[in-house]
Amino acid sequence: MSIKKNIANKLRTSGLRPTNQRILIAKNLFERDNTFHFTVETLNREINKNGNKKISLATIYNTVEAFKKAGHLKKILTSNTKSYYDTNIRSHHHFYDDETKELTDIDYQKVKLSKIPNPPKGKKIKNLEVVISLQKL
Amino acid sequence: MSIKKNIANKLRTSGLRPTNQRILIAKNLFERDNTFHFTVETLNREINKNGNKKISLATIYNTVEAFKKAGHLKKILTSNTKSYYDTNIRSHHHFYDDETKELTDIDYQKVKLSKIPNPPKGKKIKNLEVVISLQKL
DNA sequence: AGCTAGTTTATAATTATTCTAAAGTGAGGT
DNA sequence: ACCTCACTTTAGAATAATTATAAACTAGCT
Ligand SMILES: [Mn+2]
Ligand SMILES: [Mn+2]
Ligand SMILES: [Zn+2]
Ligand SMILES: [Zn+2]
């Protein structure tokens, strides 16, 4: 099965019509070797880089949100005022370099939590994230 | 020593002139029994609540930033696009309720990390935060 | 091919934050 | 107490990030 067909199916089974725009964005996001951490701004630059705009900014916003709702992207915690997303949707942890504003995944087995608190009553734990902020030595 | 004098000194020793505005904001932030988690919006509402505006929004922004730089406030990690601050400046962890957008402190001893990764070379760890997102049972 | 609900797009609107520059003020010197 | 001046406050403008609007487009069905 071709990559394009594959992506189209992934979209369809998520209730998303495989439009040209969504396929192009999905290719860019999900056909990578490594986890991709991005903002709408960086993704937009990436998608529309060879000078000529191909996909509108509004569609980038719409699509990222649609992919997130479908569970193909995760929103990441930062102390910034713009939203960061992650193609790695497993529960995992990050280094955050405040100078370069870059996020990097931490190998799952490199963090061990030996004790976590009980959630308040009426609530359950949806996700647990560790963010390690870095600074120059 | 009066509370006001006390606050004035705290500001002076941080290199901040104890202006009326800063003292009023500092009182509101630092004379609480419990940790206060807030955004500029909520703080502004709090400060200027009895109808008549007393302090301009720009000053709230300036002061929060000044207090953060002086180490009296901490910026908190969230997945929102507005900045959250914390009067608890010790390294500590949070529950985050995505429905109510509310943060609550987690008792320090309720989280135990038995293993944390080495920082990348040239960097050292500035801070480590655990955020536990909650959802309805 | 024709229909239609879902999608894209340019653009406007909204929200959060920062900037600007004029007016106001705390504090040290007289 | 009065002067002075650097620091601070303020209203409003500017910028940045995101969301809303509504007209044009299109995937997928008949
Ligand atoms: Mn954030
Ligand atoms: Mn913003
Ligand atoms: Zn990641
Ligand atoms: Zn806290």
Image (spheres, coloured by chain):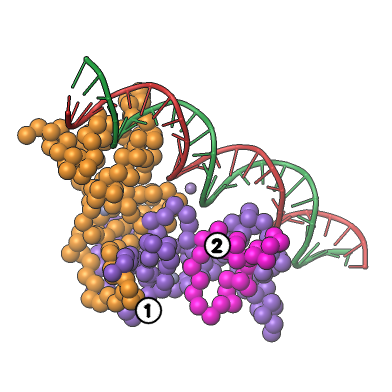
Chain colours: A orange, B purple, C green, D red
Q: List the residue tagged with mark 2.
A: B42
User: Relative to B122, is D21 above or below?
Assistant: above
Residue A86 location, x and y as percent?
28, 49
Residue B104 location, x and y as percent?
42, 71
Camera sees residue B106: yes
Rendered image quadrant of residue A96: bottom left
Q: In this view, does B101 lie to the left or right of A50?
A: right
Residue range of the region highlighted in magenta in the rendering: B25-54
Chain under label 1? B
Rendered image quadrant of residue B24: bottom right
Check disc 1 and report its element: helix, strand or loop. Answer: loop
Quarter of the rendering occupied by the N terminus of chain A: top left
**Kind of residue indicated by mark 2:** Thr
User: Relative to A11, is B27 above or below?
Assistant: below
Q: Is residue A5 magenta?
A: no
- Nearer to the camera, A13 or B108: A13
Q: Which residue sits furthest left?
A: A1
User: Relative to A53, is D11 above or below?
Assistant: below
Residue B107: mark: 1
Pointer 1 and pointer 2 on the same chain: yes
Q: How many labels does the image show?
A: 2
- The structure residue drawn at horizontal position 38% and vertical position 69%, both measured from the top left corner, is B94
